[in-house]
Image (cartoon, helix red, strand yellow):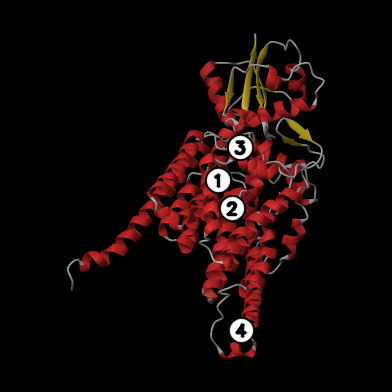
Amino acid sequence: MPPGGAAFRGGPRLRRLGTAAALAALCACVFLQAYSSLRIKSLTFDELAYIPAGYSYVRTGDYRLNKEQPPLMKLLAGAALLPLVPRLPTEHWSWTDAADGEVGNTQWAFGREFLIGANENGEALVRAARLPTVLLTMLLVVVAYLFARDLYGRPAGLLAAVLCAFSPNLLAHGRLATTDLGLACFVLLSVYAYRRFTRAPTVPKLLFAGTALGLALVTKFSAVLLLPLMGLWAVALPLMSGGVPVPEGPWARLVEPPKLRALAFSLGSAAAIGLVALLVTSLAYQAPGRIDIYFRDLGMVGVNTQPAYLTYFNGIFHERRVPYYFVAAFLLKTPLGFLLLLAARAALSLKRSEESPGDRLLLFAPIALWVGVVSWRAFQLGLRYILPVYPLLFVYAAGIVATPSFGRRGVRLAVAGLAAWFMASSLRAHPHYLPYFNELAGGPENGIHWLDDSNVDWGQDLILLRDFIDATGEQNLKVTPMAQYDPILYGIEAEVVPARAVVRLLSRPNPPPGVYAVSAHVLNRARLDRSAPVDPLLDLDPVVVLGHSMYVFAFR
């Protein structure tokens, strides 16, 4: 054995151990950031419907509540509540009305009864229901590493994992019992699994790809965009250079020429993956083979959203859709460090691409389709609708470490600096990830003047308001949250004033004496009435702004 042979054999093993340790550390960072944030963030708007619905699915197998989104994330949230043994108030009128097909107020009423009326530990139930989403965020970090490693090598994989672990946009939804982070995770997993299958087709890889696709479909209904994508990939990849390898066998010679044989195999494989995905979908509904339930509920999307809801962007309410809304939201709410890293990666790709044509199609087609379709059809309520593009962009941007230019010391330092800037942006945002805005937008304190709704305020800061009340001893408080539940859930015994009423009070030249805690979303929507003499958001000075989403005014 030559000298140093043992060390040579230990080299790959040590690298694997080092990589595993780095991934474990990044997952721990995700958990610490997400958990420490979720503990001080109150129940958000959609969670009021999702958490009780999920627990009812687990306990009864009855899916009558919240049919407008598939069940997976709700099932996970509901399963997380089982150790706490909460009571399910099936005697409440909302449970019966939901069975009769009533939509609208029933799921919100049932949510209020479940978290406030039927159980005394509503705050603990919310915290527990969010834990599965935190675990999926950790899984997302690992999948991003594997995907980028397979495309560009181990260093790129680690960079992609870092970007996922410190993304304020992923962390904003990675600690809520909602569907958006789960969709981002399973879309990335679906693309990664399909690529693995096309590189070396085997039955286990086909089953893995089908399962990943099925998990995406039962996370959020917008995942149906993966179905036409699968068809596109199945047709295009065999015709590109490198093609799709066809397993050897007597049957393979039945189709000639080889390109046509590869196309036939690719289409057949895509169909098989789709069948596996549909089976997974039916199992999530606890009705094996009944895929009709999924497509029936698909028609419920948006049933509780007002069609006349005006889009808000840059201080203006728009009666029509803003075609650049989601692109603008991406530019305003993504850390500048990553935007510059992405621009550098794209610029270097103009000279030489590090991906094959097939890999470019796998990476960029979902990004283009998601942004295009969402911009065309989705309600313009938040960046979360295009959240699945972030992990794909992180994987692509991480490929910069595989470019020839990365061999230059200056480029390596620049990439390290941009990555550090990106991480610092996330750490500065902690624990208020949802209202994050970058320096171009003027930071999170200026975010409400650009966008509203789940970009800024989703009802998440009642716990901070409780802490403010405890610290100041304020007793006579009037509260107007962006929420459909009584703040008593968080121990806030205050007068809840309807949005229109508090806006009328605060829009007067001399508001009546009192202390008012008002949601940023409510204040912003008050600006629809331009005839008011006072704009509370612009003309009044708050005592404090809690978490960039709750404005506290005092008039003595």
Q: Mark 1 or mark 3: which comes first in sequence? A: 3
Q: Which mark is residue 184?
A: 2
Q: Position of residue 128 (x, y in %)?
A: 53, 44
Q: Are marks 4 and 1 in contact (CB under 8 Å)?
A: no
Q: Is residue 235 left or right of residue 491?
A: right
Frontmost of labels 3 and 2 is 2
Disc 4 versus disc 3: distance between alpha carbons?
Answer: 57 Å
Circle 4 residues within 10 Å: few <14, some 14–19, many ≥20: some
Locate the N terminus and report the quarter of the image it occupies: bottom left
Q: Is residue 512 visible?
A: yes
Question: Which label sits on residue 13?
Answer: none
Cα separation, mark 1 vs mark 3, equals 18 Å
Residue designated by label 1: 170
**Residue type at numbered disc 2:** Ala
* Residue situated in front as seen by the camera: 419 or 168: 419
Q: At label 1, which amino acid type do we have? A: Leu
Q: Is residue 95 above or below residue 466?
A: below
The numbered disc on residue 258 is: 4
Q: Secondary structure at mark 1?
A: helix
| Nearest to N terminus: mark 1 or mark 2 | 1
Above or below, 141 against 254 in this view is above
**Mark 1 touches mark 2? (CB < 8 Å):** yes
Q: Where does residue 8 sit, x and y in percent of width and height?
A: 25, 66
Residue type indicated by callout 3: Leu
The image position of residue 377, as x and y in percent, is 76, 50
- The reply to whether dot 2 and dot 4 touch (C-beta < 8 Å) is no
Dot in front, 4 or 1: 4
**Mark earlier in primary sequence (4, 1):** 1
Given this view, does label 4 or label 3 mark the residue nearer the observer? 4
- Mark pair 3, 2: CA separation: 21 Å
| Residue that label 3 marks | 43
The quadrant the C terminus occupies is: top right
